[in-house]
């Protein structure tokens, strides 16, 4: 009798597993490779139309010297101030359009093929002028403050992959060996920046082009919302090799007070188009059906942003 009951229980488990597999297959996302829409030209970042760079603002090297001996939170505030007063190279004041196609199967009214169009800055947030700039790593709270000011969003891992697909060129990643806390220091940020630019020049690539392999992205992920103890952490992902695979899988174990030379901040304009109709990217990420067009996670976001208005980590700014 016990054997029969066990067999019946196993049959139920198998049936449940098959049902789950069918559900996963039914909601799977497939996409046509992302590409840059060159015909669309450029879209000037609206914020910077009223915030021009002051000619007396520090260039990239000078700014690194200014922040070399500051603490993390002070450097965050200084970096935000430089960006929001327009101290960025001109290539980062205009978006380029990237589009891709998503196919949703067995997904109700959203079943079928959908075209997604988004406006993206071609490189990571940088400080300085066109001749002398440094890509500046930031923590997630500072990055979100900038994104909110520019009416932008940080990317999901899915969107990081799409941006990498659309790249106009690819370089091999250039990691530094960790020596104590050197990788978190501004001088290391500048060294990394110089190495990236040298690798780009060797490939005939220029700042302002979409280039894969530069940095890991600070990203949005529902894991920070749904896994206990991670609500004040940062999520990083990417740093794609030329063959397309990311060096860094999604990682959430650093606190929100951490950044190093390998982190980059990418801005995506919040107004996107799906099948020709405008939507707010943040609202799409929070929608129980539409989120699969811009995310490969299993659930929608409760809040598709870092909450920088929360108390700092451990209610401290040290």
Image (spheres, rainbow, N blue to C red):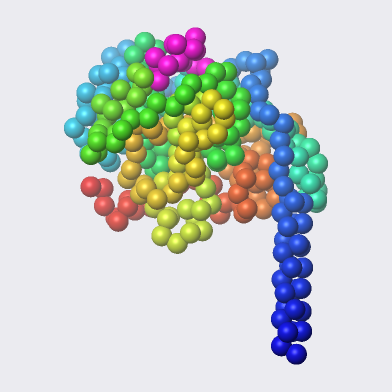
| In the foreground, 103 or 116 | 103
| In the foreground, 166 or 248 | 248
How many marks the image carries: the answer is 0
Report x, y in % for residue 295: 62, 43
Let me know if residue 253 appears in the view. Answer: yes
Snapshot quadrant of residue 62: top left
State the residue at coordinates (41%, 42%): 140
Residue span colored magenta: 196-210
Report x, y in % for residue 228: 45, 62
Locate residue 106 relative to residue 223 in the image: left or right: right
Report x, y in % for residue 192: 34, 24
Residue 201 belongs to magenta span: yes
State the residue at coordinates (37%, 48%): 254
Let me know if residue 53 appears in the view. Answer: no
Q: Is residue 164 above or below residue 41?
A: below
State the residue at coordinates (75%, 78%): 7
Q: Is residue 108 above or below residue 273?
A: below
């Amino acid at each position: 009798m016990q054997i029969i009951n066990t067999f019946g229980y196993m049959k139920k488990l198998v049936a449940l597993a098959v049902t789950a597999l069918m559900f996963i297959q039914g909601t799977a996302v497939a996409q046509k490779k992302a590409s840059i829409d060159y015909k669309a030209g450029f879209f000037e970042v609206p914020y910077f139309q009223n915030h021009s760079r002051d000619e007396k603002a520090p260039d990239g090297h000078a700014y690194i010297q200014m922040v070399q001996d500051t603490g993390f939170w002070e450097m965050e505030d200084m970096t935000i101030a430089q960006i929001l007063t327009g101290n960025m190279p001109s290539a980062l004041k205009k978006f380029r359009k990237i589009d891709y196609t998503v196919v949703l199967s067995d997904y109700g009214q959203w079943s079928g093929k959908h075209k997604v169009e988004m406006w993206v800055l071609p490189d990571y947030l940088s400080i300085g002028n066109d001749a002398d700039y440094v890509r500046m790593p930031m923590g997630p709270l500072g990055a979100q403050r900038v994104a909110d000011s520019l009416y932008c969003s940080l990317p999901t891992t899915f969107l990081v992959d799409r941006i990498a697909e659309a790249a106009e060129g690819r370089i091999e990643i250039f990691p530094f060996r960790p020596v104590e806390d050197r990788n978190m220091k501004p001088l290391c940020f500048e060294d990394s920046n110089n190495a990236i630019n040298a690798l780009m020049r060797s490939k005939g690539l220029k700042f302002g082009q979409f280039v894969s392999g530069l940095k890991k992205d600070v990203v949005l992920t529902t894991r920070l919302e749904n896994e206990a103890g991670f609500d004040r952490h940062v999520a990083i992902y990417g740093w794609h090799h030329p063959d397309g695979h990311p060096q860094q899988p999604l990682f959430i174990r650093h606190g929100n007070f951490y950044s190093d030379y390998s982190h980059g901040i990418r801005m995506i304009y919040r107004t996107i188009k799906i099948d020709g109709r405008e939507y707010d990217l943040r609202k799409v990420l929070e929608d129980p059906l539409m989120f699969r067009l811009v995310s490969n996670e299993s659930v929608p976001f409760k809040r598709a942003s870092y909450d920088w208005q929360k108390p700092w980590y451990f209610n401290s700014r040290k």
